Image (cartoon, rainbow, N blue to C red):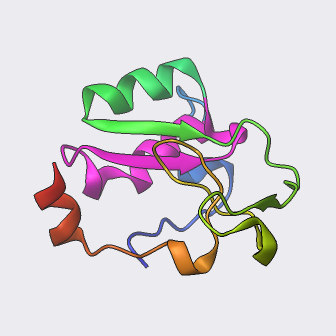
Amino acid sequence: MLDAYVYLGKGSYPTNVPSAHFFTLELTEKIHGTNRNLTCDNWFTSIPVAKELLQKQVTLVVDANPGPTAKKRCAVCPRGKDRKTKVFCGMCRKPLCGEHTAPRCEECVTQQK
């Protein structure tokens, strides 16, 4: 777990800001200034939150359609294999099966930049 915040009811957070705004900023405090992406659903999203996170060098990525996604055929495999996947390339959005995806450690990601 990266961070946690105990919610003790309405009095446990400031009332001058929306709760989603407060909790998003509070829980991401450790990654401020790291140029990382924060992925969340639309409940935690607003223009003011996105602007404030951007000022803190955190990019907000929103799942615009959190519903189920259809499986697509892997863009790299031969058509005969007919491998279906829900995983997509983060840059070009091509569908990729497990054979054609690879996790990268933070050191490799940093070197790539």
Q: Quadrant of the N terminus?
A: bottom left
Residue 107 or residue 1, whichever sits in front: 107
Residue 93 or residue 107, whichever sits in front: 93
Image: 40 above or below 49: below
Image: 52 above or below 31: above
x, y percent for residue 64: 72, 35
Residue 103 or residue 8, whichever sits in front: 103
Left or right? Give the position of 102 relative to 17.
Answer: left
Residue at (45, 48) in percent of width and height: 38
Locate residue 110: give its quadrant: bottom left
Residue at (54, 68) in percent of width and height: 6
Residue span colored magenta: 19-45
Q: Is residue 34 visible?
A: yes
Image: 43 above or below 101: above
Q: Is residue 14 visible?
A: no
Q: How many marks?
A: 0
Residue 71 or residue 17, whichever sits in front: 71
Left or right? Give the position of 28 relative to 5.
Answer: left
